[in-house]
Image (cartoon, rainbow, N blue to C red):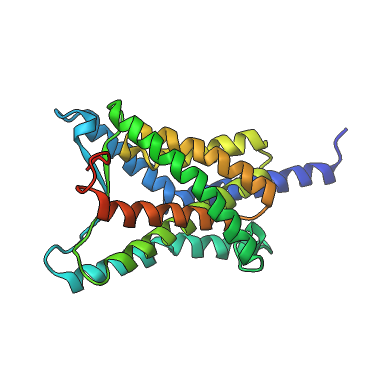
Amino acid sequence: MTSSTDSAGQVDRATADSVLVKEVWLVLALSLGASAVSALISFTGVLTSHHPIGDQTAVIVGSRAPGRPWLDLAWQVFAIVTALVPVALVAHLLARGGESLRTLGFDRRDAVRDLGRGAAVAACVGGVGLAFYLAAHASGVNLAVDPAQLPGTWWRVPVLIAVAAQNAVLEEVIVLGYLTRRLEQLGWSFRRRTTASAVLRGSYHLYQGLGGFAGNVVMGVLFCHLYRRWGRVMPLVAAHTLIDVVALVGATYLIGKVGWLPG
């Protein structure tokens, strides 16, 4: 027979789990979950267009005020800062439970090792990712990705670097660190946590095409395994930042100048 104490404990646990589930949905609805829905709508538009997928272009960082560079810069900075608000929300929610971003390994206590690991991961993933993107575009399942269409002003490169860092912090803290931790607290197995995190990562890249989706799912699986091994998101933040810096800045100056890069 179940005691009243056991029953109360089960009710408390069910209530706590319900709160966590709602919390996760709200965080995702304010951040990358919403981005996934947006990407799905965008890809639907691509599929229903009269043009082949390979003939269409996805722009990652575009001008927000063409012909008005200072206003454009203000909008770029605003977008970067507000995109990080969900990370601040996650920090607040963790703190309420006696945890912090340090619990996820998002801190500078092992900066040198984190950067070294991140650079190694970036070198491997970046090269493979580029080859996969070129193959996906050539096969007609991926759009041509134009990383940046910004005016040639003094702030173009600093903004692109800031965008790269913002993307890395947002994605790795929320999709890799926060989401997998909350799912673990809800009793999900490592395989289920990895699947959920990787599919979500792929989903908000669907605006690039099926290649962008598949490539990021694979990257998500790898990052989950590395996070489990190292217990820190910081090396993956470093890796993601380096990958995006090379993609955004490099492609900005290469598209149109080399024949092998679609644009």
Provide residue 178's location: percent of width, then percent of height.
58, 52
- Left or right relative to 102: residue 258: left
Which residue sits at x=59%, y=62%? Answer: 106
Query: Which quarter of the rendering shows the N terminus?
Result: top right
In the image, 137 versus 51, the foreground residue is 137
Which residue sits at x=43%, y=49%? Answer: 32
Residue, far top: 139
On the question of residue 124 being in view, the answer is: yes
- Left or right relative to 19: residue 128: left
Provide residue 130's location: percent of width, then percent of height.
39, 40
Residue, far left: 67
Which residue sits at x=66%, y=37%? Answer: 190
Q: Is residue 209 above or below residue 234?
A: above
In the image, 173 versus 8, the foreground residue is 173
Residue, far front: 258
Provide residue 202's location: percent of width, then percent of height.
43, 38
Query: Which quarter of the rendering shows the C terminus?
Result: top left
Q: Quadrant of residue 134?
A: top left
Q: Is residue 52 above or below residue 231?
A: above
Q: Quadrant of residue 132?
A: top left
Provide residue 40's location: percent of width, then percent of height.
33, 37
